Amino acid sequence: MSGAPPSAPAAVATRPSLRALAALALPMVLARATQSVITFADTYQIKGHGADALAAVATGGINVFLIVILPMGTCFILQSFVAQRVGRGEREQTVRYAWYGLAMAAAAGLVALLALPAVRPVIGLLGFEPEVKALMGDYMLIRLLS
């Protein structure tokens, strides 16, 4: 026996397949699409309540998306790091990314909670009709709390 330490197993070079890529990407695509689907469903449900309600929900949904996409996108970046680690066979390294994601989600939730009182004043600066502003404020507060 030689005194040399055992070498690590050689990495197997595999060509990524479209199926593997789709399996990794599907959760991220679905997560990003949910905000648009929620806004579409809410807008569809409110269509019978008049033009003001329709304008408030459709525009409010886009505004909420603009607010939440940065923290969501940051968490999606963590998903790509996890996918890379899993692909390398380093599952034990993924736990720290879960903690990072939870910490970022908690921080974003706290910032959003503290910013809730500013929603109506900011909407008040926009050029919408008073009824649309009031409805949009209600809708955005509910969506941001969810």
Image (cartoon, grey):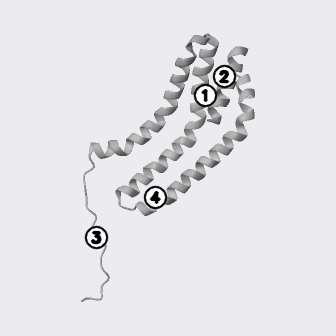
In the depicted view, which residue is nearer to us: 110 or 49? 49
Q: Which residue is mark 2?
A: 136
Q: Which residue is mark 3?
A: 9
Which of marks 2 and 1 precedes in the sequence? Answer: 1
Find numbered disc 2 in the image and state the secondary structure of the residue it sits on.
helix
Which of marks 2 and 4 precedes in the sequence? Answer: 4
Identified by mark 2, the residue type is: Met
- How much space separates mark 2 and mark 3, taking CA atoms? 59 Å
Find numbered disc 1 in the image and state the secondary structure of the residue it sits on.
helix
The answer to the question of whether label 1 and label 2 lie on touching residues, with beta carbons closer than 8 A, is yes
Identified by mark 3, the residue type is: Pro
- How much space separates mark 4 and mark 1, taking CA atoms? 33 Å
Identified by mark 4, the residue type is: Thr
Expressed as whole percent of the image width and height from the top left, the position of residue 100 reads 55, 54
The answer to the question of whether label 1 and label 3 lie on touching residues, with beta carbons closer than 8 A, is no
- Residue 63 has which mark? 1
- How much space separates mark 3 and mark 4, taking CA atoms? 21 Å
Instruction: Name which quarter of the figure residue 49 lies in.
Output: top right
The answer to the question of whether label 3 and label 4 lie on touching residues, with beta carbons closer than 8 A, is no
Expressed as whole percent of the image width and height from the top left, the position of residue 96 reads 51, 59
Task: Report the side of 81 relative to 1 (left or right).
Answer: right
The answer to the question of whether label 4 and label 1 lie on touching residues, with beta carbons closer than 8 A, is no
Expressed as whole percent of the image width and height from the top left, the position of residue 124 reads 73, 23
- Crowding near the residue tagged with mark 2, few <14, some 14–19, many ≥20 C-alpha atoms within 10 Å: many
Which of marks 4 and 3 precedes in the sequence? Answer: 3
Tell me the residue at 41%/60% (across/down).
Answer: 91
- Residue 94 has which mark? 4
**Is residue 47 positioned above or below 10 on the image?**
above
Which of marks 1 and 4 precedes in the sequence? Answer: 1
Tell me the residue at 60%/21% (across/down).
Answer: 57
